[in-house]
Amino acid sequence: MNTEVVNFIKEHKGDLLENWMAAMKISSHERSLNLISDDVFKDISHEFIEVAVSNIIDSENGFNQKVERFTERVVRIGWELVFLMDGLSTLKILVLELMQKEKDYSSEEVIELITEIDRWVAPMTNQIIESYSNNWEKTVSLQKVALQELSAPLIPVFEKISVMPLVGTIDTDRARLIMENLLSGVVKHRSEVVLIDITGVPVVDTMVAHHIIQAADAVRLVGSRCMLVGIRPEIAQTIVNLGINLNQITTTSTLQKGIEKAMEFTNRKIVVLKEGKD
C-alpha cells in the first residue's frame, strides 16, 4: 500500500474520527444512531477508526480479532450492516478529501490515491461482512433458544402442582419442546399434577390435539396426572366435531377451575376464611 496514504491515515486518526462522526450523524440512518447515546456513539466510532487503522499497522490475526470484537458489539446494540457499509464508504471519501486539502494532486495522482484507498478498505469490507454475519447468526440462534424456552415454560404454582401456559400456534418443533419441558419439569418440581393451559392457543386441530394427548400420556408414564384447562366453547365444539378423544385427560374451562381440581387430586382444597368480628 502507498506509504503516503498509510502515513496520512495514521497521523490523522483524530481528524478522521471527528469528520466521520459528523458525516454519519447527518446520514439517513437515524434508527441506528437513536439506539445509543452520544457517548456510546463516540466510543464505538473511535473503535471503528481503530479497526480501520489496524488494517494498516497490525498483523492479520490482530486485525481480525479487532474486527470480531467490534462487530460483536455493534450487533449487540442493533446497528445494521448497511450502516457499517455506508460508514466505510464515508471513510474512503473523507480520507481522499482530507489528503486533497493538504496537497494539490494531479488527476493521475488522485486516481492513484483512490486506488490505494480502495485497496485499504476492501479487506475491511470483506472481513466486517463475514464477522458481522457470523455474530448476527450467533445472536439470532441464542435468541431463538431463549424464546423457545419461554414459549413452553413449566411453572410450579403450588406444592406438587405445576402449570404450562401455552400461547400461539403449536407446530411439530414446539410440540417437541413442550414434551421435553413437561417431562423435565415434572421431575424437577416433583409435580403430581400438571395443568396445560391452552387459553392462548388460537386453534386446536387434530395435530395440536394429538400432540397434547401424547404429552399427557408421557406425563402419566412418569407418575403424574395431566389436565387440560382453558377450553373455550369454540375449542370444545371443534374437538367434538373432529371426534378427538380426550377421555383420558381431565379438562376444565378455566385455569382457576383447573387449579381447584388439582388441589382435590392432591388432597387439598381452597378455603375462604371469614374475618372474625372484634
Image (cartoon, rainbow, N blue to C red):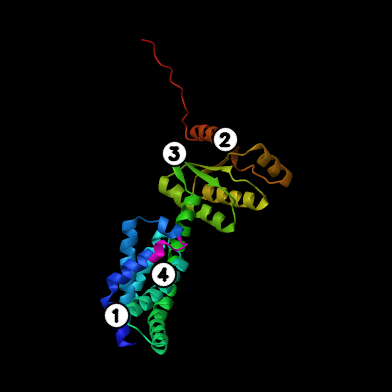
Q: Are marks 2 and 1 in contact (CB under 8 Å)?
A: no
Work out whether mark 3 precedes mark 2 in sequence or the reverse, and give the earlier one: 3
Question: Which residue is located at x 37 percent, y 74 percent?
Answer: 94
Give the magenta part as a residue range.
23-29
State the residue position of label 3: 157
State the residue position of label 4: 87
The quadrant in which the N terminus is found is: bottom left
Question: Which residue is located at x 68 percent, y 46 percent?
Answer: 244
Query: What kind of element bears circle 4?
Result: helix
Please state the horizontal and vertical placement of residue 81, each as a whole percent of the image. 45, 68
Please state the horizontal and vertical placement of residue 131, each as a whole percent of the image. 41, 72
Image position of 64 (left or right of 136):
left
Query: Going by the picture, which residue comes out furthest to the right?
Result: 241
Work out whether mark 3 precedes mark 4 in sequence or the reverse, and give the earlier one: 4
Query: What kind of element bears circle 3?
Result: strand
Q: Report the Cα–Cα distance between label 3 and label 2.
A: 15 Å
Foreground tag (2 vs 1): 1
Q: Report the Cα–Cα distance between label 4 and label 1.
A: 19 Å
